[in-house]
Image (cartoon, coloured by chain):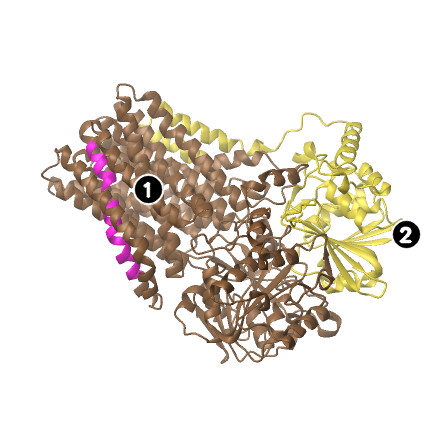
């Protein structure tokens, strides 16, 4: 590393730099920078699948079926809970984060994308209210985790990812895990997937300043669209878009955590 | 060469250069990290790194016996190391995989942050090392050396701002290596010839290192560049921002939700080029061929609200960026549009690379582009000039929702600003402001409150008849009309909302059943809050609301700060289970900065002073700490307060920062030099020095108090002047105050130098630590108590210094 080299040069050259204090500083810097390469969390030992399953069960039990922030938010749909129990999230996170795969939080997967918090994934899946006959469109595949959870519940998941390397790795991963009913497409999700429309549910995970109108058109009357809203690593609102049987659009802002900033005095 | 001119060339000129390099490096790093990360984290990183400045005082104090008699050699070594460290440390800092967004989820990021602090502290440590040794070498004339350091810093501050018009911030460390190397060469010219071999090191680095800024993967520009077919079509820079224009088919930004836009019928959005300011998303330029038909989508955003009730208006757009609001005005039959833009990069690109693409939008007969900030521009205009003033959506949705601007002063959204907007409107004119909505509601609530307050200040008897508030799921547009809204206008607004599927949160005569129809919120807080603000329960509402939504004022212009300590338990309750959704990163970063600076400052400076300064009277140590600490705080408090005040007057933050920094440093340097000259004969007379300090502090207090009364008048007088005139007036105002502010510190150092020279480096370190902490604390005080309090605290500190100065040389 160039930095290391130049620091050494200072020490060799700076004749008067014999002070222990400065050497100490140098050592700190060297170890600090050297540590960067080893920053990847070394997994002690790969735990057996059984341990992952146990961690997954705990996650579902303690964070999804009984979230610590209130029973009101608990995910109750048994198909969703079963799916969360089944999909191996540790296979969807970067290697160095496997150790925290079953904590209830979002994790970075590179390319500015994250794998969502498990609770949010479960919650969105439940809100989408889809069943075994349904076909779901997802915009923003990311790691493919949400698609896998959906695939456990519905007939087919069609998912579009705009970042080529993400789409590629999700495709390989989902195939390896045996998700035959998921189709990953690389491309711009703005226009949806017209020749497969209409869909019985749509999830849009890509942040946007507006809901792409073509997606609304591709939503079957009576079906739902869910959009998590917030900056990376945060979900501030879940937008639920309902298309009435008459084609009328109603949106609902669902707070994942109910926080009432204002109570009118009586 | 006489010995005097030799000293000048080998000591004073290098110190001048090093002073300039230090501050220029600081400003350049601020820019680098504002681009790489976010503004307030940049502030945090640089503030902590600046403690390197203080640490070197401690290091010199601890090493004083080893250094004794060899100061010149250590000065040469320090300056050589400095010339190497600028590029080396900048390079290393761009290799550290730190990302602010991941701070919460990955503990390893804390280590990266620590490495970043340490790496960046090195150049500041070395610069300060050289200056401290200079102070020891020029023991008898401390004031003179200090004056050179200050003058150099002042020139560095102005110089780097000029430089940033020409080069990207990433090039600045490279360029600064040249004066730093020159400083070393001058110092080494007095030593053995083999020292000059050292020149090879910085010169080699100059050949090898060319490192661009490492952009966070979570910034808008990073996202844009990952899109298929993304291409940078132009780049330009100014001290305000680095502006990058990117074209990609998948860029489709709109000023908010397109509610009910029939894309199948009216067509897709026109092709866009994204504009990214400092790597964050800001604005888009649309392909425009003179036909406004492709812009039908602009009728479907909340920002179209004011056009429902105006007829061929004369429009002012504040913050026009890529021109979407200008197009909207044209589409809605504006008679003429005046577009204000602060960033000089925008017109530069729009008139060159993007001219054809944008259909020469800013060169049309009915569009006038003015490079100006809203307040400054309007102060200089006549009344009743516009029928509609539109304050555009200035930031991106993602940046707004992350709360990264929590501490940015914004003089566009204060009560005084809105009073000004109203006064420049025609009698039936309308002010319209659109904001991204946040969950839970904050921005739009505060904006509504501020507009009500401004309406009352403007003499509007019954504001309930003058306001309307329409929202989609992600934007809210609030209008304030100079005249009461007529019934037909109210009907038009109702029809608009109904047709577009937008929700009414406030309108004269609104009933609960009119609200929450299309984007249904669990609690329609916007409506409830609007009613509360307009009722006599306003006070209770401000008191009880979980966020800080009291109107922003010029004294407390932090519109984007919503955090309240009172609500902390409620936030924590909501945060259980890993929710960080209400965090305002700007505020957290500032708080973290203050805490870190306090702890590190204590560890690096105060603790060693307690532990190792044996043989020095405790009373004297306390005296030194109180005196130099108070001066550090007081100086920075005034500096920050003046930057804030001038930001409004000079209209450009970058002018304000460079005018204040340069004036403070240069005139303080002159003051310090003058004091040194006055005392040339009475140098040994302690009583004379004490008297000088008292006179100076008295003068600071007198001038300062006079300013509190007179400055508003002076600034009103100069409001309409051209830039150069306002800058000159600012400098003239600052000069006398800064002149006297330059005296107490070197006077104290001289006193110390005569009696307890070993405490000089410590005094330097203490002052450095207090300055860093002072700068961050000043912001925190301003956020909560206002800038007036910052100024008053500073005077209190100068007064205390006048009393403690006796103790440092007792």
Name the residue at 45% across, 44% down. B780
Determine whether B477 is above or below B112 in the image.
below
Q: Main secondary structure of the magenta part?
A: helix
Residue that protrudes farthest toward the right in the picture: A133
**Range of the magenta residues?**
B727-751
Question: Which of B241 and B420 lies nearest the eye of the viewer?
Answer: B420
Please indicate whether residue B528 sits to the left or right of residue A177 in the image: left
Q: Residues within 10 Å of mark 1 (few under 14, many from 20)?
A: many
Residue at mark 1 = B634
Taking the magenta stretch, the answer to whether it contains residue B734 is yes
Question: Which of B14 and B677 lies nearest the eye of the viewer?
Answer: B677
What shade does chain B have? brown
Query: Chain for mark 1?
Result: B
Name the residue at 23% across, 34% down. B805
Which chain is the one coloured yellow? A
The reply to the same-chain question for discs 2 and 1 is no
Residue A133, numbered label: 2
Question: Which of A145 and B186 lies nearest the eye of the viewer?
Answer: A145
**C-beta proximity under 8 Å, tags 2 and 1:** no
Taking the magenta stretch, the answer to whether it contains residue B719 is no
Question: Which of B584 and A188 lies nearest the eye of the viewer?
Answer: B584
**Hey, which quadrant is residue B444 in on the image?**
bottom right
Estimate the x, y position of residue B230 in percent, counting from the top left: 61, 59
């Amino acid at each position: 590393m160039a930095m290391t080299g130049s620091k050494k040069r200072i020490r060799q050259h700076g004749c008067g730099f014999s002070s222990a204090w400065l050497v100490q500083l140098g050592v700190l810097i060297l170890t600090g920078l050297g540590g960067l390469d080893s920053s990847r969390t070394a997994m002690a030992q790969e735990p057996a699948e059984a341990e992952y399953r146990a961690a997954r069960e705990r996650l579902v039990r303690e964070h999804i079926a009984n979230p610590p922030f209130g029973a009101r938010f608990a995910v109750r749909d048994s198909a969703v809970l079963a799916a969360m129990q089944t999909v191996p999230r540790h296979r969807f996170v970067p290697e160095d984060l496997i150790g925290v795969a079953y904590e209830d939080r979002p994790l970075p997967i590179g390319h500015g994308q994250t794998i969502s918090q498990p609770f949010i994934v479960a919650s969105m899946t439940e809100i989408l209210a889809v069943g075994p006959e349904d076909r779901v469109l997802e915009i923003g595949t990311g790691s493919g985790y949400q698609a896998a959870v959906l695939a456990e519940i519905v007939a087919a998941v069609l998912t579009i990812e705009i970042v080529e390397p993400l789409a590629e790795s999700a495709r390989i991963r989902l195939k390896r895990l045996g998700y035959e009913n998921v189709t990953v497409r690389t491309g711009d999700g703005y226009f949806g997937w017209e020749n497969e429309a209409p869909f019985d549910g749509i999830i849009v995970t890509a942040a946007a300043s507006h809901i792409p109108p073509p997606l609304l058109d591709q939503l079957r009357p009576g079906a739902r669209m869910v959009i998590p809203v917030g900056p990376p690593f945060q979900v501030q609102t879940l937008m639920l878009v309902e298309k009435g049987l008459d084609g009328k659009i109603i949106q609902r802002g669902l707070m994942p955590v109910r926080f009432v900033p204002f109570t009118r005095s009586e | 060469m006489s010995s005097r001119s030799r000293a000048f060339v080998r000591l004073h000129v290098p110190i001048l250069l090093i002073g300039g390099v230090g501050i220029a490096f600081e400003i350049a790093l601020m820019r680098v990290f504002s681009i790489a990360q976010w503004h307030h984290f940049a502030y945090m990183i640089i503030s902590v790194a600046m403690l390197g400045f203080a640490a070197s005082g401690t290091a010199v104090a601890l090493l004083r016996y080893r250094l004794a008699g060899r100061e010149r050699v250590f000065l040469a070594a320090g300056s050589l190391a400095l010339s190497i460290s600028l590029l080396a440390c900048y390079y290393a800092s761009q290799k550290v995989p730190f990302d602010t967004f991941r701070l919460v989820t990955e503990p390893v990021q804390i280590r990266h942050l620590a490495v970043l602090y340490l790496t960046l502290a090195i150049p500041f440590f070395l610069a300060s090392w050289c200056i401290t040794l200079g102070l020891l070498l020029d023991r008898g004339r401390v004031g003179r050396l200090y004056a050179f350091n200050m003058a150099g810093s002042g020139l560095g501050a102005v110089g780097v701002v000029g430089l940033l018009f020409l080069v990207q911030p990433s090039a600045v460390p490279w360029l600064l290596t040249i004066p730093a190397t020159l400083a070393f060469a001058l110092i080494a010219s007095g030593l053995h010839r083999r020292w000059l071999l050292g020149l090879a090191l910085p010169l080699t680095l100059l050949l090898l290192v060319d490192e661009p800024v490492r952009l966070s993967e979570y910034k808008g520009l990073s996202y844009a560049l990952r899109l298929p077919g993304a291409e940078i079509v132009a780049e330009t820079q100014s001290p305000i921002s680095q502006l990058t224009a990117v074209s990609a088919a998948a860029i489709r930004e709109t000023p908010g939700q397109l509610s009910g836009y029939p894309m199948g019928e009216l067509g897709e959005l026109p092709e866009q080029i994204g504009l990214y300011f400092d790597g964050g998303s800001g604005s888009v330029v649309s392909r425009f061929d003179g036909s406004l038909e492709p812009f039908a989508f602009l009728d479907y955003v909340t920002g179209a609200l004011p056009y429902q009730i105006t007829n061929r208006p004369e429009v002012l757009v504040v913050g026009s960026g890529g021109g979407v609001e200008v197009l909207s005005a044209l589409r809605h039959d504006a008679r003429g549009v005046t577009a204000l833009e602060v960033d000089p990069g925008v017109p530069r690109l729009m008139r060159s690379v993007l001219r054809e693409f944008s259909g020469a939008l800013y060169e049309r007969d009915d569009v006038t582009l003015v490079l100006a900030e809203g307040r400054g521009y309007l102060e200089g205009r006549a009344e009743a000039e516009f029928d509609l003033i539109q304050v555009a959506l200035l930031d991106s949705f993602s940046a707004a929702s992350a709360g990264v601007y929590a501490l940015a002063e914004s003089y566009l959204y204060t009560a005084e600003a809105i009073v000004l907007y109203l006064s420049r409107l025609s009698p039936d004119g309308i002010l319209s402001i659109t904001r991204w909505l946040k969950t839970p509601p904050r921005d739009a609530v505060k904006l509504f409150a501020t507009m009500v307050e401004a309406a009352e200040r403007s003499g509007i008897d019954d504001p309930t008849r003058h306001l309307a508030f329409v929202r989609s799921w992600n934007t809210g547009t609030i209008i304030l009309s100079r005249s009461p809204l007529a019934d037909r206008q109210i009907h038009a607004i109702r029809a608009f909302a109904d047709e577009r599927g937008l929700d009414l949160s406030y309108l004269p005569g609104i009933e609960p059943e009119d609200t929450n129809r299309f984007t249904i919120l669990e609690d329609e807080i916007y409506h409830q809050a609007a009613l509360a603000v307009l009722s006599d329960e306003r006070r209770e509402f401000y008191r009880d609301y979980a966020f800080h939504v009291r109107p922003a004022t010029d004294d407390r212009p932090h519109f984007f700060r919503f955090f309240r300590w009172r609500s902390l338990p409620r936030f924590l309750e909501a945060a259980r289970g890993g929710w960080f959704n209400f965090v305002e990163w700007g505020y957290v970063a500032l708080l973290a900065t203050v805490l870190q600076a306090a702890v590190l400052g204590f560890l690096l400076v105060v603790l060693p002073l307690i532990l190792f300064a044996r043989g020095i009277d405790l009373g004297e140590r306390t005296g030194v700490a109180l005196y130099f600490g108070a001066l550090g705080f007081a100086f920075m408090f005034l500096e920050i307060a003046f930057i804030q005040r001038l930001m409004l007057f000079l209209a450009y933050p970058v002018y304000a920062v460079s005018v204040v920094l340069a004036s403070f440093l240069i005139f303080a340097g002159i003051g310090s030099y003058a004091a040194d000259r006055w005392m040339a004969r009475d140098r040994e007379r302690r009583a004379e020095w004490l008297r000088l300090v008292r006179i100076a502090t008295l003068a600071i207090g007198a001038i300062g108090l006079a300013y509190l009364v007179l400055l508003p008048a002076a600034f009103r007088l100069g409001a309409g002047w051209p830039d150069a005139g306002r800058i000159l007036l600012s400098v003239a105002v600052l000069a006398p105050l800064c002149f006297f502010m330059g005296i107490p510190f070197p006077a104290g150092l001289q006193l110390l130098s005569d009696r307890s020279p070993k405490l000089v480096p410590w005094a330097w370190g203490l002052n450095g630590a207090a300055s860093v902490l002072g700068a961050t604390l000043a912001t925190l005080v301003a956020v909560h108590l206002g800038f007036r309090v910052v100024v008053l605290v500073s005077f209190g500190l100068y007064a205390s210094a006048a009393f403690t100065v006796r103790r440092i040389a007792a």
